[in-house]
Image (cartoon, rainbow, N blue to C red):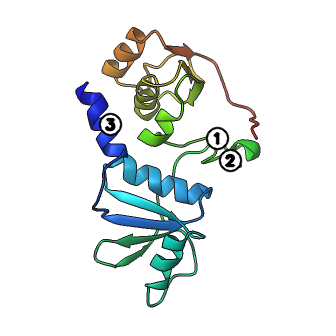
Amino acid sequence: MTSFLEEWAQVHRPGFQLVRIVGEQWSPRSHEIRDCLDRGGIASGFYDVNSEEGRKLLGAIPEPPGDLPVCILYDARVLVAAGVDYRRLGLERVDRLVGAGVFYGTAPSEAQAMRGKLVYVAGAGNSAGQAAVHLAKYARQVAILVRGESLRDDMSDYLIQEIETKGSISVRLHAEVVDGKGG
């Protein structure tokens, strides 16, 4: 019950926002920044550039940067969001779905949206293992896709043990993502 309430509070926290992000709703970059802040537990809010609040926030900046997304700190300082670089699969059709079903990272809001679904996690490192364990709280089934022989080369023992105890997580060895589709 405690973990449920902590996660609910993280997703539904009212009030103070250390960072306000203004960007395009379905932009992969906007998603990456929201995900990074969310995973770091940083109180933030997202405002679509076409929303009234988004336009109002941008209008209050004396010299707004030309590129989106823009991060505005609580004291009105503006940050141009560059950085956060995830190792990508490098598949054009998959990359077009970033933020719309394909995620490099799992924020609580995306994980909850996977309730009852089959979810695939590509990778064999600690980040992939942590994502799989987190997603397993919501998804019907989580399949970890591993190119190599085992998880043991790149993943911590404690994570492997936790994955092995979860009936809703399967590990598929010698697997590779070669394409994707969605719509």
Q: Quadrant of the C terminus?
A: top right
Instruction: Please name the residue shown 33% across and 79% down the image.
Output: 76
Q: Quadrant of residue 48?
A: bottom right
Where does label 2 land, which residue? 95
Instruction: Please name the residue shown 46% across and 9% down the image.
Output: 167
Give the left or right position of residue 152, taking residue 98 as reference. Answer: left
Amino acid at the residue labelled 1: Leu
Mark pair 1, 2: CA separation: 8 Å
Q: Nearer the viewer, mark 2 or mark 3?
A: 3
Figure check: 6 above or below 64? above
Q: Quadrant of residue 94?
A: top right
Q: Quadrant of residue 61?
A: bottom left
Is mark 1 in CB contact (under 8 Å) with mark 2?
yes
Where does label 3 land, which residue? 7
Where does label 1 land, which residue? 89
Q: Earlier in the sequence, mark 1 or mark 2?
A: 1
Percent x, y for residue 87?
55, 45
Amino acid at the residue labelled 2: Asp
Percent x, y for residue 3?
27, 29
Q: Earlier in the sequence, mark 1 or mark 3?
A: 3
